[in-house]
Amino acid sequence: MSKYATYHNAAPYFDLVRGALGDLVDGKHFFDIVTDDVIYEVLYDVPGWPRVIRGRTDLMAAFRATLITSCFGPPTS
């Protein structure tokens, strides 16, 4: 099992970004090319998604939460 198996449903996005960067970066997966101190900015409003995410760990958590919500629906209390 891949260490990024949890993120399988986001593979089209990750593959697009990784492919566009080509040989400019090292690493096979999207998260392999993201630094620990990344600032990930989204230039448009996506419901439930922050406009700015700081750090690789928080970026991975945001993708994981989004994928879980998209597969299973929003958390209930």
Image (cartoon, rainbow, N blue to C red):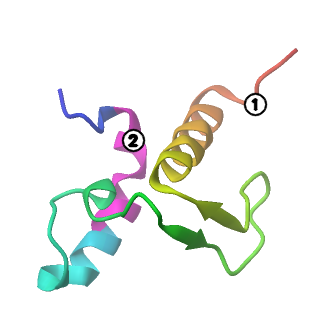
Assess disc 2: are there few (<14), some (14-19) or many (≥20) residues with their C-alpha within 10 Å of its C-alpha: some
Mark sitting on residue 7 = 2
Residue 8 falls inside the magenta stretch: yes
Q: Residue furthest right?
A: 77
Q: At which x and y percent is residue 75?
A: 76, 24
Query: 29 left or right of 55?
Result: left
Query: Is the magenta region chiefly helix, strand or loop?
Result: helix
* Rendered-image quadrant of the C terminus: top right
Percent of width and height locating residue 34:
35, 63
Check if mark 1's residue and mark 2's residue have beta carbons within 8 Å. Answer: no
In which quadrant of the rendered view does residue 32 lie? bottom left
The residue that appears at 39% across and 41% down in the rendered structure is 7
Quarter residue 49 falls in: bottom right
Mark 2 falls on what kind of element?
helix
Residue under the image location 60 percent in, 37 percent down = 65
The Cα–Cα distance between marks 1 and 2, rounded to whole angstroms, is 17 Å
Residue 39 falls left or right of residue 74: left
Q: Residue at x 79, y 57 (%)?
A: 47
Give above or below for 58 relative to 68.
below
Q: Position of residue 11 (x, y in %)?
A: 34, 53
Residue displayed at 38% across by 33% down: 6
Number of numbered callouts drawn: 2
What SS does tag 1 mark?
loop
Residue annotated with mark 1: 74
Q: In the rendered view of the protein, which quadrant contains the N terminus?
A: top left
Disc 1 marks a residue whose amino acid type is Pro
Picture coordinates of residue 52 (x, y %)?
Answer: 68, 67
The region drawn magenta spans 6-15
- Does 24 lie within the magenta span? no
As drawn, 61 above or below 51: above
